[in-house]
Amino acid sequence: MQVEASRGPIEELDVQALAVAVFKNEKSDEGFVKKLDELSGGLVRSALESEEFVGKEGEVAYFHLVGNHKLKARRLFLVGVGEPGDYKAAQVSQMAGTAVRSLRSKNVKSVAVLPRASTDAAQTASAVVEGAFIALFDPDKYRTVEKEEKTIDRLVVMIEGAEEKSLQHGVKAGQIVGESVNFTRDLANEPGAYMTPSDMAERAREIANEFGLSVDVLDEARMEQEGMGSLLSVARGSDQPAKLIILKYTPTTPASDSKELLAFVGKGVTFDSGGISLKPGENMELMKYDMTGGATVMGAMRAIAQLKPPIPILGVAPCTENLPSGKATKPGDVVKAMTGKTIEVINTDAEGRLILADAIAYAKKLGATTVIDMATLTGAVSVALGDVNAAVLGTDQALIDEIIAAGREVGEKFWQLPLDKEYSKQIKSDIADIKNVGGRKAGTITAAAFLKEFADGLSWAHLDIAGTAWGDEAKPYRSKGPTGIAVRTLLRIVERASQR
Ligand code: BES
Ligand code: MG
Ligand code: ZN
């Protein structure tokens, strides 16, 4: 899809369809709506006055323009966006997504989106383009019949009176971000057979070469040398060798000579059967997306390489399968992490924390001072927060607040769960330093309490995205399947950190 920016006027937009945001209860006899009504030959007024369409969030109205109109476009698509006060980047993205997804199904090839947001033109334009790319992603890669073959070839973002440079900049950034979110979703969507740890490493090398990142992939021999017994214990049951992916972005002109290093660490379990503590069969196929945390790190790094912020960023993705076999780690086994801590493995299905333990420690060895890790870590997070909020926990309240604020700006919701030291009692082992499960109570918190043991001396936060990484239902602005949660939040965190 080719993307362009425009400052109008509306009547000159040479596209097949116009998609226009309309606020709740807007009057048809004044301002922009009046003008649009006149240009469209009275259709807008008719829709509003009949109260068929009142501009409620998510409401849509669609017209073919025939006869007496003054637009080059022949179709008009109105999207309700609710109250102006609640209309932020996230809503702009959804508005654009709803429009392009729907218009694509009507075989429209070129669309101009008029988001009508009065704030920052660059951010608004970026939100439109991100929303459009995200909306057009489909998970049907391996379908050969009844596949969605229609495409939108041209997208024009029109913001009246915007400064040309900000508009151009926003459109470009939006495409980078939207494509990178889809990159993450594509990896998460791949079957386990096609997205092994080695495949993840290959994808990491590809983005590093294409966009300019340094890359290092530790094989099992190097993990052995580093003493990563915890990560390696998970890989033991699989024939696919584990890989620890390291991506690094270094700015050409750094903002400062500070020694701060922000690192993203993501769980890359390319298939989680549970191991010897085998999962039940129902829905096990979804455990192909247990590498979403790692894919999120890779998607964010892919965007960062192109957006070129003035601060360095480290990306770490420990990748392995979790399978049962005669070589697999058994419940009751004790393993030794890179930090020297010993871990009693009570349940081999609590493997995410085992691989993250060594990955966080390694990020620290590489100089990380702040670590945000992300993982489809616990089923318990779905019980607590459903598919609406991801959980955030950590040891640095300022960092947690930053994540929640950044998420709010891009429309991704994070809800903090407590991490009082009392919870750590649940992971005390009788035979080793700690054990990898903390019983039935507070499963998301005890998983974080486990990780905390390896985040000593770091400013650290953890995101549990197990409930939010996969959408069971399609939305008007997004297909079902992988959501790409957290990529945009990480990018906003980098942007906010760059401005300090
Ligand atoms: N990959 C799962 C968590 C998960 C569950 C992700 C559902 C997405 C959807 C994780 O490795 C796991 O199995 N966790 C266990 C931990 C338990 C054994 C303490 C869980 O949540 O049941
Ligand atoms: Mg192995
Ligand atoms: Zn598991």
Image (spheres, helix red, strand yellow):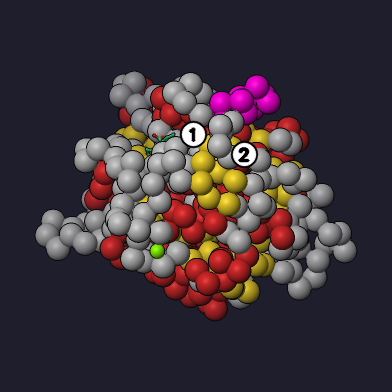
Q: Main secondary structure of the magenta part?
A: helix
Q: Amino acid at mark 1?
A: Val
Front in this rendered view, residue 115 or 48:
115
Figure label count = 2
- Identify the residue at horizontal 67%, vertical 67% (top origin): 249
Provide the residue designation for mark 1.
437
Whether residue 407 is visible here, answered yes or no, is no
Q: Is residue 425 magenta?
A: yes
Residue furthest front as drawn: 431
CB of mark 1 near ligand 1 (< 8 Å): yes
Left or right: 471 in relation to 399: left
Tell me where residue 329 appears, x and y as whole percent: 40, 51
Tell me where residue 485 appears, x and y as whole percent: 48, 44
Front in this rendered view, residue 385 or 108:
385
Mark 2 lies on a secondary structure that is loop
- Identify the residue at horizontal 21%, vertical 41% (top origin): 281
The answer for how far apart the CA atoms under marks 2 and 1 are is: 13 Å
Q: Quadrant of residue 456?
A: top right
Provide the residue designation for mark 2.
433
Left or right: 173 in relation to 456: left
Tell me where residue 274 appears, x and y as whole percent: 34, 44
Q: Quadrant of ligand 2?
A: bottom left
Quadrant of the snapshot with the N terminus: bottom left
- Residue extent of the magenta highlight: 418-427
